[in-house]
Amino acid sequence: MVQTFKAKANPEKRFFISLITRDIGLADAIVDLTDNSVNAAMKPLRNSFSSSSDFLKLVRKRDASPAVTIKIVFDKSRVSVTDNAAGIDFEAAYNEVFRFGHSEDHHETRDRLSVYGIGMKRALFKIGKKISMISDHKEGGFSLNLDVDSWENDESVPWTFPIAKRPPTPKTGTSIVITELNDEIRGRLSNERFQFELIEKLSKVYSYFMGRVVDITVNGKPVNRTEFEIGENYAHDKFTVGAVDCSITAGIASPTGGVFLAEASGWFVFCNFRTVLYADKTPTTGWGGALPLFQPKHRPFLGIVSFTSASPEELPWTTTKGAINEDNIAWQDAKLRMSAVAKPIIRVLDTRYTSEGTDLQPQALARLSGPVDNVFNATVSERRAFAAVKKEAPRKVRVQYDAKKAEIEKIRNHFGRANMSASEIGRTTFDHFIDNELESR
């Protein structure tokens, strides 16, 4: 009889931390921490937010002033994210919050923006070595003080985090403070542009939630949401795959200052209305494949793909929630439909540039687009087709004829212009006929 042994297969914490933090940047890590605050703000509404129609309620609700404020503060020595949401109760912290991956019991109480149960922990490890977390809840919260180096060197299993109970309190919220920042993080925070980059990312990622569910500030500066508007003449399709609802909308964007900007055109992809792809013009969304390569003439194009589900792990986003899982079934179905929805708009935009110039003027494009509407309203419309522009009859006709060189020279001598071109002579003689033979009648 062959004797068998149980070879060690437990993960090394040092390797584990390096693995999960390698492919996420600082801005995305802070956004991951912000996700926890947005989830907490959504928790009282969680059971009402499963479909696109449910999410649209906040767009149409006039008194949807946010009750939750998220404050992000950082300098070269610390990063903190605090909110005044409902907080995390002790039982949730003890059983679920610090797991690397969700348990089966989490199925019924999952958050709308929490997918794999790894984001917060990965963000904490990415940023620094000392972590302080306090969460107050009406049923009792918790506190955590974690020294990452000490935890990393502790080989005991199962893995645990040291938390303490906090008493129930009517004043709720969560505070995360990270110090002893990792070297690369201090370098990023030393760059004066990082604050601008973070504000811009938050504005795009939470365009739906800000001003409706939460308000966000970065070092005291308010983050304004990015607005998305589309002309009422748009194409729309929708379908359901398993637990995922998907809507696809394409039309003409609302110009900024009368100009269609490249950074505001392309495909925008939302998962539970959190922005995953912003103004994408790559093969991921079909450009250069089922659709032509994106060119300046396509800048008026605006496409929106919205996935919603009460089971966020079914949505086609990656663990960082900043890219698409292209193997996801819902995404594969959506990508096929996206090109069909987009092509009528692309065909119209392609006619704007021909061998004879621009056929469709900006004013005509505005008339074709129609009054603007919020894109979130468009995501729950019924199926509809894009009403293509009817090409107007050309207003000009090219006039060409042959003339004897001797007669052309007589006309040049008449005007005293030896270098007068043939086209100028044609235009002058044509105008002379209009002025003297037609206008005089």
Image (cartoon, rainbow, N blue to C red):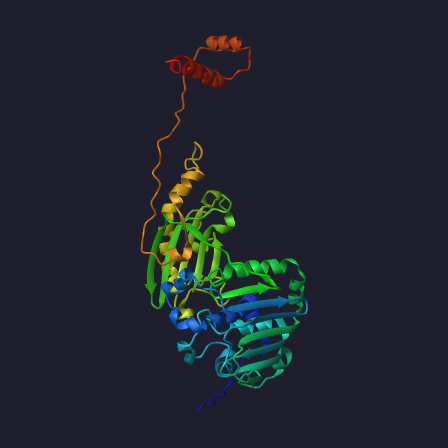
Quadrant placement of the C terminus = top left
Relative to 369, residue 420 above or below = above
Q: Quadrant of residue 151?
A: bottom right
x and y percent of residue 438 in the render? 38, 15
> On the rendered structure, is 288 left or right of 186?
left
Q: In this view, does 409 lie to the left or right of 181?
A: left
Relative to 150, residue 342 above or below: above
Q: Nearer the viewer, residue 257 or 5?
A: 257
Residue 386 position (above or below residue 361): below
Q: Where is residue 112 in the image (x, y as percent from the top left)?
A: 44, 70
Q: Position of residue 271 (x, y in %)?
A: 43, 63
In this orientation, does residue 350 appear?
A: no
Q: Residue furthest bottom?
A: 1
Q: Position of residue 226 (x, y in %)?
A: 50, 56
Q: Is residue 78 left or right of residue 115?
A: right
Residue under the image location 53 percent in, 15 percent down = 420
The structure residue drawn at horizontal position 36% and vertical position 46%, both measured from the top left corner, is 344
Visible in this render: residue 300? yes
Quadrant hosting residue 352:
top left
Q: Quadrant of the N terminus?
A: bottom left
Q: Residue at 49% of width from left, 45% of height from top?
A: 260
Up/down of 131 relative to 223, above or below: below
Q: Count the labels in the image.
A: 0
